[in-house]
């Protein structure tokens, strides 16, 4: 009674939730009864199905998903569309819209009958009325009409359970619960932490709590797993804005600072504009507005796109009149249905633009090939997870009109690249057939200098431009097969022994002997020693024993010339023919734009070897190793840590837990084939630094000239050509300044370098960031 009094008093003051909930809205039990009644009707048994895809976290309520299709009980090779009726508890208009959409697809009005029949035949439509049933019950009980979150149990003293439902009927003051649309693991860290008072001036308060960790909630886990299983092409997530400020909008992913968009920005925006044009505003002849999201805070629509490729649109479907009366409910439903129908039509090109590239990938036997990565070079970016074929070998990509270069690739198979032109008149078909790479037999012997046997397992880690694979091998003799090609390979015992790291061209059967020796030099580069480091730029700082690239949680944006750099003091490595640097770290950067560099330099400050990154690896610390070799020995070396960033979009930067320099006086770790001789085969290293803002270097061994060097852009256009003719050389380092030595000026982007002799050809990829 007291709670209702407070609720009414607050509602009168703010103009929201002043009336009790209209009985036209469906409670959770009424949703279940409605779906169950449809499930009992014989005329729908072949086109209608209800599944439980998960359960809520606090009360174990089922999360129900409806499938409508012509062969509803099997998963067909058809595109799939998803409509999410409700995420936030008080935003209940979407529930009514998707329930009406179910009835329309099952029993359409006569003018839509043939249209709906085509939709049922050509696509699989999934509808989830609510994935926040706990919050829906809170609203329908009217104990808190402004409730937003689920009912995860917390305490006012901290994010630990106390066994009490801590809600407050005034807007935004609920202690319990997680905002499910802040709980996805893409940019999750930018969401609100526990009991942070949101700075907006419309009483948001604690309503945007992101949860204790990404996907901490059973509800978002259920949506995540369902989305990964179903490979949706399109989706609408229905919302309503209590503030009224973001009403009647179609929001797509994304437009961050300086106009930074998704790789699929053109197609996403074109469809968002058309979707908005099918949604009429309340009491108006105008239509919804289309906008791009500018936030980074664990939203579902951004995660759907990056993780699965699905274009999900967040649609704010009401006004400040968040829970209207029955007349406006009915009016709103009728205005929302055309938007859902449009998106289903766009899926198959029915009466709509149809620009889409699709196809089947098969293996050498003609069988559908699952988990093949499909890359559209013009729409590719590190921010996205790989786009893979499904269990039918099928891929589907929504595009705008244009010509595209597609590559199909899978570990152990020869990548295939084709060019195709898509238009709006129909779906464009491009199939692929992949042939396995020829394998070579590796006879690997692992031993220890002065000790013949260790009862240990080792990871034999192989990496090239496209793949990484790991084989578990044992101390002693191992035999296994590997695909032909150029591989970076490493195996490590522990860091008291010098790591074995090589770049190998595998073109025939080979014997490889790895003999581990303990380090002659093993130096820890401590972060607490002021004499160890010299800051050149930035505000590098020590935090809990780790070296951080900045003082605060996020690094500052800057420019390419303003590189953050810190250098170690010089270390005497006289007598060492091999040196290594071992780093244990994590990092989080703006994908493909901001860059990290770990560099070993010699006494003349020339680069010996380098590691770089342009992506994100923050969830767990990882260990990376770089090795330099010189049979004539080294003198002094030092470590350089550099951080390059642009003027917008920042993340948590670089955290280094430990850093060590190792030295060894043994110049040879034999690589032989069918005998004791060291291999002599032309090999080409990866470009370094990579990314680069100018000069790149590439190490080549056992070169047989003439050697042709050609550089291409992503469109396959040749932009550089050079012929080298120096006779046979054991080793050279080829260098080129991409900024001022090219045949034509080039812009930032991805470039391919081809090195070819009369017998061999290597293609290397380089990211150029124009200064």
Image (cartoon, grey):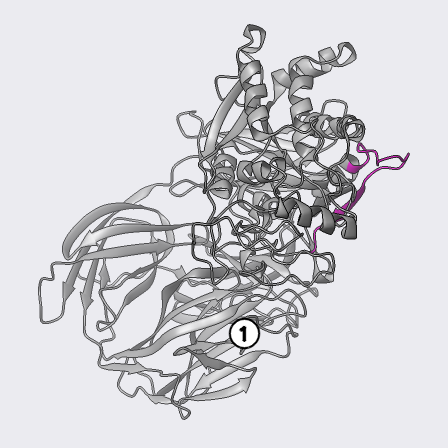
Q: Can see residue 68? A: no
| The magenta segment | 276-294
Residue 32 in the image, given as x and y percentages of width and height: 54, 24
Residue 443 in the image, given as x and y percentages of width and height: 20, 51
Q: Is residue 759 left or right of residue 378?
A: left
Q: Residue 719's quadrant in the figure? A: bottom right
In depth, the one of 657 and 520 nearer the eye is: 657
Q: Can see residue 767? A: yes
Q: Is residue 284 magenta?
A: yes
Residue 457 in the image, given as x and y percentages of width and height: 19, 56
In depth, the one of 182 and 685 nearer the eye is: 182
Number of numbered callouts drawn: 1
Relative height, residue 656 to residue 510 (above, below): below
Q: Residue furthest bottom?
A: 531
Q: Quadrant of the N terminus?
A: top right
Residue 510 in the image, given as x and y percentages of width and height: 24, 52
Q: Is residue 611 magenta?
A: no
Q: Residue furthest right?
A: 285
Q: Main secondary structure of the magenta part?
A: loop
Q: Is residue 216 left or right of residue 452?
A: right
Q: Is residue 363 left or right of residue 510?
A: right
Relative height, residue 25 to residue 2 (above, below): above
Q: Quadrant of the C terminus?
A: bottom right
- Secondary structure category for the residue under label 1: strand
Q: Which residue is mark 1?
A: 643
In depth, the one of 568 and 295 nearer the eye is: 295
């Amino acid at each position: 009674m007291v709670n209702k009094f407070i609720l009414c008093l607050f509602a009168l003051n703010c103009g929201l939730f002043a009336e009790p909930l209209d009985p036209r809205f469906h409670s959770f039990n009424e949703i279940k009864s409605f779906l169950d009644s449809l499930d009992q009707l014989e005329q729908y048994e072949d086109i209608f199905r209800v599944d439980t895809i998960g359960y809520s976290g606090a009360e174990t309520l089922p999360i129900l998903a409806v499938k409508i299709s012509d062969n509803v009980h099997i998963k067909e090779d058809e595109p799939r569309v998803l409509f999410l009726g409700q995420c936030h508890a008080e935003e209940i208009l979407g529930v009514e819209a998707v329930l009406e959409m179910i009835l329309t697809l099952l029993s359409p009005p006569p003018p839509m009958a043939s249209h709906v029949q085509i939709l049922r035949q050509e696509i699989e439509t999934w509808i989830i009325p609510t994935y926040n049933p706990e919050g829906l019950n809170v609203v329908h009980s009217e104990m808190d009409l402004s409730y937003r979150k689920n009912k995860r149990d917390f305490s006012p003293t901290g994010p630990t359970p106390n066994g009490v439902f801590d809600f407050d009927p005034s807007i935004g003051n609920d202690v319990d619960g997680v905002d499910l649309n802040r709980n996805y693991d893409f940019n999750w860290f930018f969401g609100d932490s526990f009991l942070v008072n949101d700075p907006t001036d419309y009483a948001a308060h604690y309503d945007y709590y992101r949860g204790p960790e990404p996907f901490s909630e059973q509800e978002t886990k259920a949506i995540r797993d369902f989305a990964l299983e179903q490979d949706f092409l399109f989706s609408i997530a229905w919302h309503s804005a209590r503030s009224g400020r973001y009403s009647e909008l179609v929001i797509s992913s994304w437009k961050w600072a300086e106009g930074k968009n998704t790789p699929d920005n053109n197609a996403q925006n074109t469809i968002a504009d058309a979707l908005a044009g099918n949604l009429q505003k309340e009491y108006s002849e105008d239509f919804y507005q289309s906008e791009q999201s500018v936030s980074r805070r664990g939203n579902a629509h951004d995660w759907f796109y990056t993780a699965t490729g699905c274009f999900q649109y967040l649609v704010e479907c009401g006004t400040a009149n968040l829970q209207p009366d029955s007349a406006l409910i009915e009016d709103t439903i009728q205005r929302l249905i055309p938007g859902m129908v449009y998106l289903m039509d766009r899926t198959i090109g029915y009466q709509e633009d149809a620009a889409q590239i699709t196809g089947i990938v098969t293996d050498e036997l003609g069988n559908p090939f699952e988990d093949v990565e499909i890359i559209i070079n013009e729409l590719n970016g590190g921010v996205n997870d790989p786009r893979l074929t499904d269990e039918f070998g099928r891929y589907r990509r929504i595009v705008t009109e244009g010509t595209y270069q597609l590559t199909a690739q899978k570990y152990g198979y020869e990548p295939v690249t084709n060019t195709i032109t898509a238009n709006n008149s129909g779906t464009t078909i491009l199939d692929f057939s992949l042939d396995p790479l020829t394998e070579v037999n590796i006879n690997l012997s692992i031993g220890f200098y002065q000790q013949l046997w260790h009862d240990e397992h080792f990871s034999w880690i192989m990496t090239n431009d496209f793949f990484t694979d790991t084989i578990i091998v044992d101390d002693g003799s191992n035999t296994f097969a590997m695909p032909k090609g150029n591989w970076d390979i490493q195996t490590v015992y522990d860091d008291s022994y010098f790591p074995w790291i090589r770049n190998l061209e595998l073109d025939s059967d080979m014997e490889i002997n790895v003999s581990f020796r303990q380090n002659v030099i093993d130096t820890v580069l401590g972060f607490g020693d002021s004499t160890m480091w010299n800051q050149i730029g930035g505000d590098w700082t020590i935090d809990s024993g780790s070296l951080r690239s900045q003082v605060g949680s996020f690094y500052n944006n800057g420019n390419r010339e303003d590189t953050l750099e810190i250098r170690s003091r010089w270390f005497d490595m006289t007598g060492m023919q091999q040196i290594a640097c071992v780093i244990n770290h994590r990092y989080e950067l703006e994908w493909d734009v901001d860059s990290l560099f770990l560099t070993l330099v010699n006494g003349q400050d020339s680069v010996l070897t380098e590691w770089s990154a342009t992506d994100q690896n923050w969830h767990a610390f990882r260990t990376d190793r770089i090795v330099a070799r010189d049979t004539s020995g080294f003198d002094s070396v030092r470590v350089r840590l550099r951080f390059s960033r642009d003027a917008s979009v920042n993340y948590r930067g670089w955290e280094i837990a430990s850093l060590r320099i190792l030295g060894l006086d043994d110049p040879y770790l034999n690589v032989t084939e069918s005998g004791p001789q060291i291999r002599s085969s032309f090999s080409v290293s990866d470009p370094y630094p990579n990314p680069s803002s100018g000069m790149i270097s590439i190490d080549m061994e056992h070169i047989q000239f003439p050697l042709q060097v050609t550089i291409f852009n992503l469109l396959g256009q040749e932009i550089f050509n050079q012929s080298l003719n120096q006779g046979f050389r054991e080793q050279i380092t080829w260098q080129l300044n991409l900024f001022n030595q090219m045949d034509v000026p080039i812009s930032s982007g991805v470039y391919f370098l081809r090195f070819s002799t009369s017998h061999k050809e290597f293609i290397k990829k380089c990211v150029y960031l124009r200064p």
